[in-house]
C-alpha cells in the first residue's frame, strides 16, 4: 500500500515534542517526508532526529515537494497564510 506523504510546517514546541514522534511511532499508512522551520538549523536538526529525508526554511520549498498533506505547527497568527499557501 502506498503511503500518504506529509510535510510539517514548524519544527518547534509541540511538533518536535509530540506531533512528529507520535506520528512516526503510531501511523503506518503515511510518512513525513519534509519539515520546514524558519530557522534552517532547527529544521535540519529535527529532520536528522526523526530520519526525515528533506528539510528547508521556507513554506515555498516545503510545498514544492511531492506532498499530499501538510501539518501546520506554527503560531496561530501564521496559520491563515500557510493554509492558503498549502491549498
Image (spheres, rainbow, N blue to C red):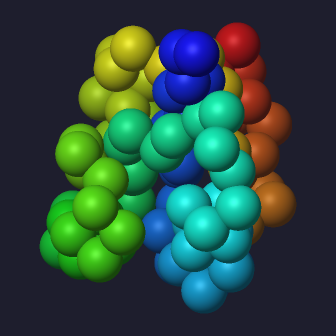
Taking the image as drawn, is residue 15 in sight?
no
74 sits left or right of 50 in the view: right
**Residue drawn at x 21%, y 69% as measured from the top left:** 48
- Of residues 67 and 38, the one nearer the viewer is 67
Residue 78 picture location, percent across and down: 70, 51
| Residue 66 sits in quarter | top left
Whether residue 76 is visible: yes
Image quarter for residue 20? bottom right
**Is 9 located above or below residue 21 in the figure?**
above
Above or below residue 64? Residue 53 is below
Going by the image, does 75 lie left or right of 68?
right
Q: Is residue 77 above or below residue 5?
A: below
Across and down, in percent, residue 67 comes to 49, 20
Q: Is residue 44 left or right of residue 31?
A: left
Which residue is situated farthest in the front direction here? Answer: 1
Question: For the point 68% across and 71% down, which residue is it?
Answer: 22
Quadrant of the frame with the C terminus: top right
Asked if 62 appears above or below 14 in the picture, the reply is above
- Determine the residue positioned at 38% across, 39% down: 33
Amino acid at each position: 500500500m502506498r503511503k500518504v506523504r506529509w510535510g510539517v510546517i514548524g519544527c518547534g514546541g509541540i511538533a518536535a515534542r509530540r506531533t512528529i514522534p507520535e506520528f512516526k511511532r503510531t501511523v503506518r499508512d503515511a510518512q513525513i517526508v519534509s519539515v520546514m522551520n524558519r530557522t534552517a538549523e532547527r529544521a535540519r536538526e529535527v529532520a536528522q532526529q526523526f530520519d526525515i529525508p528533506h528539510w528547508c526554511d521556507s513554506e515555498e520549498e516545503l510545498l514544492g515537494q511531492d506532498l499530499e498533506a501538510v501539518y501546520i505547527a506554527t503560531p496561530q497568527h501564521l496559520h491563515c497564510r500557510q493554509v492558503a499557501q498549502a491549498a
